[in-house]
Structures are given as C-alpha cells and as structure tokens.
Image (spheres, rainbow, N blue to C red):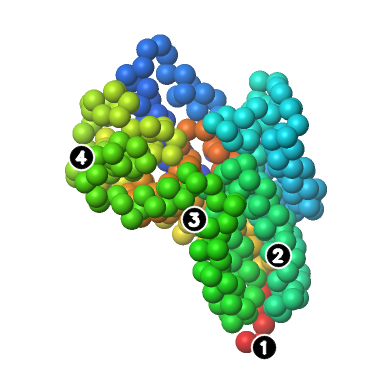
Amino acid sequence: MRNWGRAIPALGWPVLLAALMLTALGLLGVYSAEAGLEGPPRVTMRQIMFLSIGLGGFFAVQIIGYRELGRWSYVLFFLTLVALAALLVARYVPMSPFIIARRNAYRWITIGPMTFQVSEYAKVSFILALASYLRYRTNYRTIGGLLMPFILTLVPLGMILKEPDLGTSLLLLPTLFVMLYVAGAKNRHLLVILGLGMIAVPVFYFSPLMNPYQRQRIQSLFHQDQTDTNWRLNAGYQLSQSKIAIGSGGIAGQGFKQSAFFRHNLLPEEHNDFIFAVVAHQWGFLGSLFVILLYLIIIATGLTIASATNDPLGRLLAVGVCAVLCSQTLINIGMTIGQMPITGMSLPFVSAGGSGLISNYIALGLLVSVARRRPVDMAPKPFEFDDE
C-alpha cells in the first residue's frame, strides 16, 4: 500500500477514484445498450481494453512527470498538428488504409490494429503547449501579446473544425480563456476577447465553415418543443428521444437492463454522445445527480491542486485539464437535455470510445502528477501582478 501511496498523492486519490466510478457507470450503460444485440458485448469488451490502456497512460505520466513532458510540449504539439494536417490532406489525396472517411468525416488515423482520433489527443498537447508558453511570459498582458496564444489555439481549432469535429473544437477557446485568466491576463483584455467572440458567433454561423447539418442541429434547440411529427422523426429525433429517455427515468430510474427503450435501439448513439440519457433512464434523477457529483469532485480537487502549487507550469496544466473536462461535461449534458446544440461531444470517462477514454486518463495523469510535487514555501506565488 505504501508503494501505491508514493505513486498517487493524497489529492490524487479522489480524482482517480471518481474517474474510475464514472467509467464503471459508463461500462454498465454500454453493456445495457448492447443487451438487445446478438452475440457478445463487443463494445463493452473493447471499452474495458481501452480502460486498461488509459490507466497505463495515467501511470506512465506519473513515471515521466509533468515537468519532463513540459519540455517536450512543443514537439508533441507539432506532431499533433502534422497528424491533423494529414487528415485534411486525406480529403483530397487518398491515404487508405491509414486514413479512411467515416460518415464523411476524416478524424481517425489507423496504424496496424490501433485507430486514433487525433482531435482527442490534440486537447492534451494543446494544454501542454499553451501552459509551456504562458508560464514565464508577461507579454500576454498586452493586446499584442495575446496574438501568439490565439495562434496556438486557432490553428488546431480550424483543423479540427474542418474534419469536421465541432464538439472538440468548441473546447479549445474556453480552455484558452480560463488559462489566460489564471495566468494573469488583464480583465479588460479578456472582456474585449469575450465581446469579439460573441460578435463572431453569428458570423461563423453563416460562414462556409459551418455545414448545413450543423446549422440544423443549432436550429433544433428552438424547435424542440414543437409538435411537428416530421421534425421529431427527422432533424429532432435524437434530441426528442434523449429527453424521453431522461424524463422516463423518474427519481430512481427504470433499473439496470430493465427497459425496452434501449433493447429496441430507440436512441441512436446511446453508448457514445447520449450515454448520459442511458444513465438517467436506468438510474433516474438520483443516478444523474451522482454522476454530476463525481465530476464536481474531479474539478474541485483539480482546482485545489492548482491552488496548492506555486510552479507556474503545474498550475496552468491543472487549470487547463479542469477547464477541458468541465467544458466537455457541460456541453455533453447540456445537449442531451436540450440546452446545447448536438455537437457529437462525448461525456468524459463515461462515453464509449477508445481515444477519448485514453486521452482523458492521460490528462488526469497530468493533474495528479502536479499534485505529486510539493510546493516550495519560499517560492513566490505565480501570476501575481501589481499593475491591475
């Protein structure tokens, strides 16, 4: 037990245990969604394999340490951009069998038996690169100095959006904003950025970058309560079925594998984007509340880790990981209950998917790695300025 204590610090245990409980609930949800299918539960078995790989990545980060990974952050970020560029080129130059379109999207690279969704790992390399850039600089406290952080964000964002992967691309800007705030960017500059972002939303909506089906998903938010049968059976089908599944769960749920709702495949993508609807349907409001509580434990502990360290890189990494996980959770739950557009966003640690699960455990490894380093009492507090 002592060896485990050395590998995982005290603040690391709540984070890891909460993530494992979320994954366990996800596995139960995926298994119940497969109950009506013939043959063995292949998705569940694959997800268990991905969990083992993800835990391997988690402990590998503990062995390497976030500081060593920080030294390689720009290299890792560059390799991520190269992989994202390859996905863009594959639209025009055939790269089979390494890159093949799935549902008209170029998101995955296959090498041997392994398939990687590059945008999932781009989240981690982006946090590492941005934290490395911001840790010792002060030029981002000027409007001109904010240019480079925005370049580091907008380049991968544009590439991911072109795949297309609207969900993952939505995570980068909130993460940039939070990390700049923690790094000490001036409030008036951040307010200007926020205002420009709000102005850019309608411009982006009508731009060629937005696909027609993505506009249709946004429009679904404003039509979800209408009684038009044609809408409910077509554009609004997923959202309508998701809300029915959640609402029919009641207080305590329908019970594990007891509902015909999933046995008859009445909710598309139930084990991926809409896994929260599965949880709510089977375990009701109480189960949903428990899931949200587990996320709050991860975020609250992560912010405690960030505040406890006086290493600039460690603080920024911890805040960046918390920002990504919090944003992704809010967007996914929001879209399943009809408060956010359906973007193809997975629920961290719960949804089925190898790359998402592995990258999230690697990100969690960075967070726990920061907690392993004890703060130096005599060191100055990072990101404190007297010119506000």
Which residue carries the number 1 mark? 387
Mark 3 and mark 1 lie on one chain; the one further toward the N terminus is: 3
> What element does badge 2 sit on?
helix
Q: Is residue 109 above or below residue 2?
A: above
Q: Mark 1 or 4, which is nearer the eye?
A: 4
Q: What residue is drawn where x is 31% and y is 46%?
A: 288
Position of residue 318 measured from the top left corner of the image (x, y, whole percent): 60, 58
Q: CA distance from mark 3 to mark 1?
A: 30 Å
Residue 149 circle label: 2
**Can you tell which of label 3 and label 1 is closer to the viewer?**
3
User: Quick one: label 2, few (<14), some, or many (20+) residues within 10 Å?
Assistant: some
In the rendered image, which residue does mark 3 sit on?
327
Residue 75, percent across and down? 80, 48
Tell me the number on the disc at residue 248: 4
Report the mark closest to the observer, 2 or 1.
2
Q: Quadrant of residue 235?
A: top left
Quarter where residue 151 is shown: bottom right
Q: Could one spot residue 338 in this view of the protein?
A: yes
Question: Badge 1 local density, few (<14 within 10 Å), some, or many (20+)?
Answer: few
Quote the CA–CA distance across marks 2 and 1: 21 Å
Residue at 64% of width from left, 75% of height from top? 184
> How far across and how far down the image is residue 2, in percent?
58, 41
Tell me which numbered mark, 2 or 1, is placed earlier along the sequence. 2
Please tell me whether mark 4 sits on a helix, a strand or a loop: loop
